[in-house]
Amino acid sequence: MRRFSWFNVTSLTFGFAFLYLPMVLLVIYSFNASKLVTVWAGFSTRWYGELLRDEQFMDAAWVTIRVALFSSTLATVLGTLAAVVMIRAGRFPGRTLFSGMIYAPLVMPEVITGLSLLLLFIGIGLDRGIFTVVLAHTTFAMCYVSVVVSSRLATFDTALEEAALDLGCSPFEAFRLVTLPIIAPAVISGWLLAFTLSLDDLVIASFTTGPSATTLPIQIFSSIRLGVSPQINALSSLLIGVVAIGVIAASLATKRRAVTQAREEQAAARVTG
């Protein structure tokens, strides 16, 4: 094994400090008793309490969660269907146009996407609110789901579906009972990615939302234009904590699954041996 040199250790230290030191300082100052976010005046949890009593932030958080749940679910369904068409349908008239429309949001600037959706909603006379934000987030998140699921379907063994069809399953039953359980990790990953993108979106939501549907990123952006408040630090610390818990839980679940699979493979090898 290659040993770390001082250059590698220094580079790694500065890299991690550049990425995570601002987050650490943000969490520390979320417990600051002073209203000035840059002046330490003692330890206090008052800003977490005030955050929970702030109706604007709580309403924005509830809107954001609802939009993320609905849009990620719709994006997962549509993206999975699009991936199946792209991988299984072969060559068909309009395939190039279809694939281009599916993958266009990946390279399209968010400002252009948001403005085009705004003009569309105005043109059809659709009032902007939660429904329009869900449609907008579904539009740009669907392509990410399609990419993730397509990569899994490309390596899928179609002989399993053919065996199910030979045993009397209809094409829909074969997909539901055989294909879908196997590609479920990719589908779940696509849903989580779409959910995260919806939670994090600011530009597209600012074009497609209305006064009655303010999302959390828009509320935070509107608040910090007058200066960063301690409540913003508290809210950001809560989000960091939720993400950290999710990452740790996913890592433990993946490790446990790998250990279980290794034990099953060892048991099978002993039986066959």
Image (tube, rainbow, N blue to C red):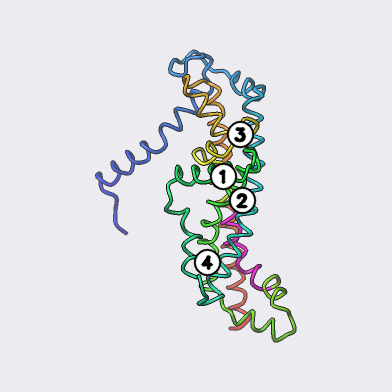
- Name the kind of residue labelled 3 in the image: Gly
Would you say 5 lies left or right of 39 here?
left
As for residue 95 lying within the magenta part, the answer is no
Q: Position of residue 132 (x, y in %)?
A: 62, 43
**Amino acid beneath label 2:** Ser
Distance CA(mark 3)–CA(mark 4): 35 Å
Picture quadrant of residue 162: bottom right
Q: Could you say whether the residue bearing mark 4 is in a helix, strand or loop? A: helix
In the image, what residue occupies the spot 53% across and 21% down? Answer: 230
Residue at figure coordinates x 54%, y 34% from the top left: 217
Numbered circle sitting on residue 150: 4
What's the distance in space between the residues labelled 2 and 1, CA to CA?
A: 7 Å
- Give residue 260's quadrant in the image: bottom right
Tell me the kind of residue under disc 1. Answer: Ser
Nearer to the camera, 123 or 74 = 123
- Mark 2–mark 1 contact, CB under 8 Å? yes
Q: Which residues are magenta?
A: 178-191
Which amino acid does the dot numbered 4 rest on? Ser
Of label 1 and label 3, which has the lower sequence position? 1
Q: Relative to residue 268, is residue 254 depicted above or below? A: above
Q: Which residue is mark 3?
A: 210
Q: Which residue is mark 1?
A: 198
Eye-nearest disc, 3 or 4 = 3
Q: Position of residue 146 (x, y in %)?
A: 54, 61
The disc at residue 72 is 2
Crowdedness near tag 2: few (<14), some (14–19) or many (≥20) residues, C-alpha within 10 Å: many
Q: Circle 1: is it few (<14), some (14-19), or many (20+) Cα within 10 Å?
A: many
